[in-house]
Image (cartoon, rainbow, N blue to C red):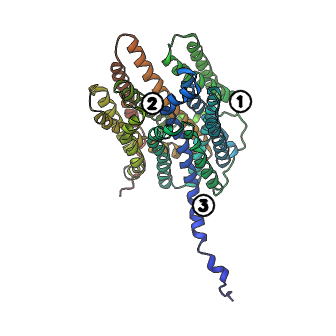
């Protein structure tokens, strides 16, 4: 005989919102993680003059405030992807966010430049753990490829919002105190850690570490990133730069040998034998090189050639970055309706149009007209990266999601670093050779456009993806 309803049973309906929160928690955690990681790659630049005035250190010291974060971030992403698979994405994310929050506090309280640079390295460690684990949490939470594609688009939205807000927020907060740009990470990190308690435990793979692979990967990535950045700011014939290239080459060879012959490779080379994986990595590398190359070059153009302030420069980037944030989820809708290949190739075509338009624009064109020409670059990137990410995750088994995510994000971050360093090197070389800043801008952006055209052609070889328009 059924039991009569009791007063306690009237409390049942509130369970539904809690279940809904549990379902959305992995996506919320992933978005918040990517938000703070992307924000710290953008927000610091406009604060550098105030940091230098307060802590000293000269231009080279301020460069390490930026590169200490990006160099550590890109160098440890492969290790973080493997660690995610070994200890579980949920635990790896929690560790990374805790490190990131503590390092952000250390940045804000830094009494001198060396401490600030060391804390920025700590932020890079945390960011390297957060990024692949956030994608792995999405892969674990959404088995359906359509839901996963939408989740990846919203994950990318977190980074897009940070990119849109970073320059302006950095300028506004620096007017108060540059230290606030680091303290802003604390409440965001606390919210992410609170949401993480609602995420189900992640599976683990009982797989030994690959110390040779991890050391040689670090050698290759640190050596290459250091060589390109330092070579761009000084000379590629300097002894330390040449030595860094040699270290990078030795590390790359050692990594490939260890992964092909090692008993427990960190990155199984069979991942790269899948055509979608190889093309996705190449396209992600070039896309980010183009985007960050434009951000770097146009920031110098606005401030050094057109005498705009840091805050004005941030506002000039707003049309591009805001549209990226608004249109990012549209990429998933387009991919679901027409297949992944359409937004990937269409986004790259838009990037080429934007890069060539900026390269050919007159030096005295209206600032807001130049700002409008940057829009296709940002929008093109926002249409390219989410379907590339979804395509990559669809091409690998769930057990390899953390490793594949680490490889993808390494390609993206290293691509961004190389884009900045290479465009800076071209501008410096042409300036030293008697040319002007605009000559370097035009050559570097044209070269980036050519590289994007090449990856767009390669993208024609990608599978069309699922078309659900019918």
Residue at position x 42%, y 50% in the image? 329
Q: Is residue 115 above or below residue 460?
A: above
Residue 245: x, y in percent?
Answer: 56, 17
Q: Is residue 393 above or below residue 146?
A: above
Few, some or many residues within 10 Å of mark 3 (<14, 14–19, 20+): some
Nearest the viewer among 81 and 15 is 15
Quarter of the view holding residue 165: top left
Quadrant of the frame with the N terminus: bottom right
Nearest the viewer among 405 and 58 is 58
Residue 346: x, y in percent?
Answer: 35, 41
Q: CA distance from mark 2 to mark 3?
A: 37 Å
Quadrant of the frame with the C terminus: bottom left
Q: Which residue is mark 1?
A: 211
Q: Which residue is mark 3?
A: 22
Disc 2 is placed on an element classified as helix
Camera sees residue 404:
no
Q: Which residue is mark 2?
A: 289
Q: CA distance from mark 2 to mark 1?
A: 30 Å
């Amino acid at each position: 005989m059924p039991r009569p309803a009791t007063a306690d049973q009237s409390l049942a309906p509130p369970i539904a919102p809690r279940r809904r929160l549990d379902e959305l928690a992995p996506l919320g955690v992933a978005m918040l993680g990517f938000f703070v990681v992307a924000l710290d790659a953008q927000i610091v630049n406009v604060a550098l003059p105030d940091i230098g005035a307060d802590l000293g250190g000269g231009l080279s010291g301020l460069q390490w405030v930026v590169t200490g974060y990006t160099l550590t971030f890109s160098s440890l992403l492969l290790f973080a992807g493997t660690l995610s698979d070994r200890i579980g994405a949920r635990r790896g994310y929690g560790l990374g966010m805790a490190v990131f929050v503590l390092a952000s506090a250390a940045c804000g309280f830094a009494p001198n430049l060396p401490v600030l640079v060391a804390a920025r390295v700590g932020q890079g460690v945390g960011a390297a753990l957060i990024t692949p684990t956030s994608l792995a949490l999405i892969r674990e939470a959404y088995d359906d490829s359509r839901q996963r594609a939408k989740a990846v688009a919203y994950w990318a939205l977190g980074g897009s919002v940070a990119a849109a807000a970073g320059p302006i927020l950095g300028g506004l907060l620096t007017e108060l105190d540059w230290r606030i740009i680091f303290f802003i990470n604390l409440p965001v990190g606390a919210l992410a850690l609170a949401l993480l308690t609602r995420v189900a435990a992640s599976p683990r793979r009982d797989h030994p570490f690959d110390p040779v692979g991890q050391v040689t990967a670090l050698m290759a990535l640190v050596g290459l990133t250091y060589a390109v950045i330092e070579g761009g700011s000084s000379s590629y014939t300097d002894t330390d730069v040449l030595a860094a290239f040699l270290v990078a080459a030795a590390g790359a060879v050692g990594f490939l040998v260890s992964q092909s012959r090692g008993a427990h490779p960190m990155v199984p080379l069979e991942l790269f034998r899948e055509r979608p994986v190889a093309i996705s990595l190449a396209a992600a590398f070039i896309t980010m090189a183009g985007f960050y190359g434009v951000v770097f070059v146009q920031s110098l153009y606005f401030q050094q050639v057109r005498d705009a302030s840091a805050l004005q420069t941030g506002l000039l980037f707003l049309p591009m970055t805001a549209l990226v944030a608004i249109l990012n989820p549209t990429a998933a809708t387009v991919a679901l309706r027409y297949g992944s290949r359409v937004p990937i190739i269409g986004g790259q075509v838009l990037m080429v149009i934007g890069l060539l338009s900026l390269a050919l624009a007159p030096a005295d064109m209206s600032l807001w007209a130049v700002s409008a020409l940057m829009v296709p670059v940002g929008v093109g990137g926002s249409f390219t990266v989410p379907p590339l990410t979804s395509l990559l995750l669809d091409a690998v088994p769930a057990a390899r999601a953390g490793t594949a995510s680490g490889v993808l994000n390494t390609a993206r971050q290293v691509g961004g670093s190389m884009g900045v360093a290479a465009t800076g090197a071209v501008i410096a070389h042409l300036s030293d050779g008697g040319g002007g800043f605009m000559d370097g801008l035009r050559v570097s952006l044209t070269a980036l456009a050519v590289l994007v055209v090449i990856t767009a052609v390669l993208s024609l070889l990608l599978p069309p993806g699922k078309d659900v328009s019918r």
